[in-house]
Image: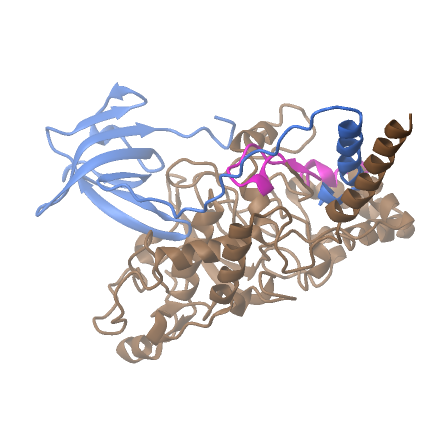
């Protein structure tokens, strides 16, 4: 009997130690997710200085660009966060209804800055936007937790879609698709299928730094870049450094929600009651994944990664094979308390202002929010400020 | 993250008690954990048809990575095999918005299509 007692005592002691070891404080902003291997942690640490680096023309910047480094824009409150710097996207709906991303005229992202060499060669200092195109302003999103969003199986997104509103709830989430037909999930219009592509594209589009999968500098509004203004050989960033930067963004932990107060718990209930959670789906589950830290986990992202009609007031551009002007991907709300401006273009100075700007499919939830008592509205805001 | 809920914290306790009672804990899955850059396949392209010039036997295709898009012009001739949803088709039956998968050759005269498969994507739906 005493041997049994000893075993049980040892088990309880072990359990206590394991609780201590298994439940350390949640990652802080800018920390990696838990459960990485030593090699993955090394990749994360090696990727951070590349993410934080500032490019110059001599190291690959430009000749067209929006920012001089990832962290130039993704800076608040730490590297990987959002920012208030905005950029310009544009597209056009052709007479046959097709959404033209203006790829042959420099679109859909029009760079706002030129290197000195390009400026001197062309006598202009930003990429011209075609006349008549629809324009959009975009703020910088944070990328915390994006590795988990990348790990959500495509089947999950497809299963959440209800393009014809067959369940009759007034919400008709649609899947956007990239130009090769794959399901999109990243970007305010859910254009980009994978995080790796999102990261690679950001080097070339935002910084003018070519990478192995995008080994050309593009054009200036469809015109070739003048010879001699960007003499560095392509790609300007090698595959290893691209992979390390990808590892940094992929492994950045989602902001841990704060412990909910009673008011915030009430707000969470109201959030669901008035229909917000129909699009801001509280949790998504990842599937099998080659990186164990991402496999079969639940992420509290508050998004369905689908497009929803947000109404005429917010409408700007179409993008991809599906997204119309008024359709936007449900913005993930994880880390919302760290944001300084709200909505895709930063027009809302507060969370409440953002809620009140919801239209289209979200009109009924917005109206329901307005019909709540002040205390109930405050509770919802307390909940959202805990994310 | 729900990874840090109390329930999650109890899992090691359950495992330890299970071990103490003679159970066998399932070994952790091996981590196959390398991050690899995407590969690029030569001489095939998948993208969206932007426009067709049936008289010239050419079409323009939107392709690229993320928001880094470009437009590629390709040429078909009598040897090019074109299908639409699996059925033989002509170039003038195609149109903007179709997703095209193309096998092609780079020649001094331009990009010559050997095989072109066109398909419509469902309208924001599940397939």
Identify which residue is drawn at 29% across, 33% down: B101
Taking B62 as reference, is A166 left or right?
A: right
Locate residue B26 relative to residue A234 in the image: left or right.
right
Scheme by which the image is coloured:
by chain
* Residue A134 seen in render: no
Residue A150 x/y as whole percent? 53, 43
| Outermost residue toward the top in this view | B87
- Decide whether residue A76 is among the magenta residues: no
- Find the magenta span and give its range: A273-296
Residue A255 percent across, percent down from the top left: 69, 54
Q: Pinpoint residue A52: horizontal percent, then vertical percent.
A: 51, 68
In the displayed structure, A65 sits above or below A242; it is below
* Residue A325 to residue A138: above or below: above
The residue positioned 27% from the left and 19% from the top of the image is B87
Asked whether, in this view, residue A243 is left or right of residue A326, the answer is left
Q: Quadrant of residue A78?
A: bottom right
Provide the letter of the chain coloured blue.
B
Identify the colour of chain A in the image.
Answer: brown
Q: Secondary structure of the magenta portion, mostly? A: loop
Residue drawn at (41%, 46%) of the image: B36
Name the quadrant containing residue B4.
top right
Decide if residue B121 is in sight here: yes
Q: Nearer the viewer, residue B29 or A302?
A: B29
- The residue under the point 88% across, 51% down is A261
Point out residue B30 in the picture as x, y percentages from the top left corner: 54, 35
Position of the N terminus of chain A, as image quadrant, is top right
Q: Quadrant of residue B29?
A: top right
Q: How many marks?
A: 0
The residue sitting at the left extreme is B108
């Amino acid at each position: 009997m005493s041997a049994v007692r000893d075993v049980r005592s040892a088990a309880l002691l072990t359990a206590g130690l394991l609780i201590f070891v298994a439940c350390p404080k949640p990652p802080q902003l800018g920390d990696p997710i838990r459960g990485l291997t030593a090699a993955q942690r090394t990749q994360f640490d090696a990727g951070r200085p590349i993410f934080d680096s500032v490019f110059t023309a001599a190291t690959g910047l430009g000749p067209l660009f929006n920012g001089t480094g990832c962290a130039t824009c993704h800076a608040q409150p730490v590297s990987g966060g959002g920012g208030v710097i905005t950029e310009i996207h544009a597209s056009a709906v052709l007479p046959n209804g097709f959404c033209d991303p203006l790829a042959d005229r420099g679109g859909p992202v029009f760079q706002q800055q030129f290197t000195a060499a390009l400026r001197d060669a062309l006598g202009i200092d930003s990429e011209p936007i075609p006349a008549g195109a629809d324009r959009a302003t975009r703020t910088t999103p944070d990328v915390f937790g994006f590795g988990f969003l990348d790990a959500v199986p495509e089947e999950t997104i497809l299963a959440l879609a209800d393009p014809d509103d067959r369940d009759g709830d007034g919400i008709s989430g649609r899947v956007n698709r990239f130009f090769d037909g794959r399901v999109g999930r990243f970007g305010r219009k859910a254009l980009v299928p994978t995080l790796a592509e999102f990261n690679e594209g950001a080097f070339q589009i935002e910084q003018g730094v070519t990478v192995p999968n995008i080994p050309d500098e593009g054009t200036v509004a469809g015109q070739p870049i003048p010879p001699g203004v960007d003499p560095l050989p392509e790609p300007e960033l090698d595959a290893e450094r691209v992979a390390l930067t990808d590892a940094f963004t992929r492994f950045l932990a989602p902001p841990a929600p704060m412990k909910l107060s009673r008011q915030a718990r009430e707000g969470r209930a109201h959030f669901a009651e008035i229909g917000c959670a129909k699009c801001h789906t509280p949790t998504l589950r990842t599937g099998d994944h080659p990186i164990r830290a991402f496999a079969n986990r639940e992420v509290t992202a508050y998004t369905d990664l689908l497009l929803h009609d947000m109404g005429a007031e917010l409408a700007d551009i179409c993008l991809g094979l599906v997204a119309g002007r008024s359709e936007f991907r449900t913005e993930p709300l994880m880390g919302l308390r760290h944001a300084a401006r709200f909505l895709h273009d930063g027009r809302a100075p507060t969370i409440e202002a953002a809620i009140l700007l919801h239209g289209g499919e979200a009109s009924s939830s917005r109206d329901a929010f307005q019909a709540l008592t002040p205390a109930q509205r405050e509770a919802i805001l307390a909940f959202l400020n805990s994310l | 993250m729900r990874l840090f809920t109390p329930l999650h914290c109890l899992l090691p306790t359950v495992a330890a008690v299970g071990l103490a009672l003679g159970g066998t804990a399932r070994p952790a899955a091996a981590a196959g954990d390398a991050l690899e850059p995407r590969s690029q396949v030569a001489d095939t392209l998948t993208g969206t048809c932007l426009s067709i010039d049936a008289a010239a036997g050419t079409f323009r295709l939107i392709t690229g990575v993320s928001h880094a898009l470009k437009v590629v012009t390709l040429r078909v001739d009598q040897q090019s095999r074109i299908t639409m949803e699996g059925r033989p088709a002509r170039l003038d039956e195609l149109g903007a918005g179709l997703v095209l998968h193309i096998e092609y050759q780079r020649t001094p005269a331009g990009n010559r299509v050997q095989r072109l498969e066109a398909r419509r994507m469902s309208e924001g739906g599940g397939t």
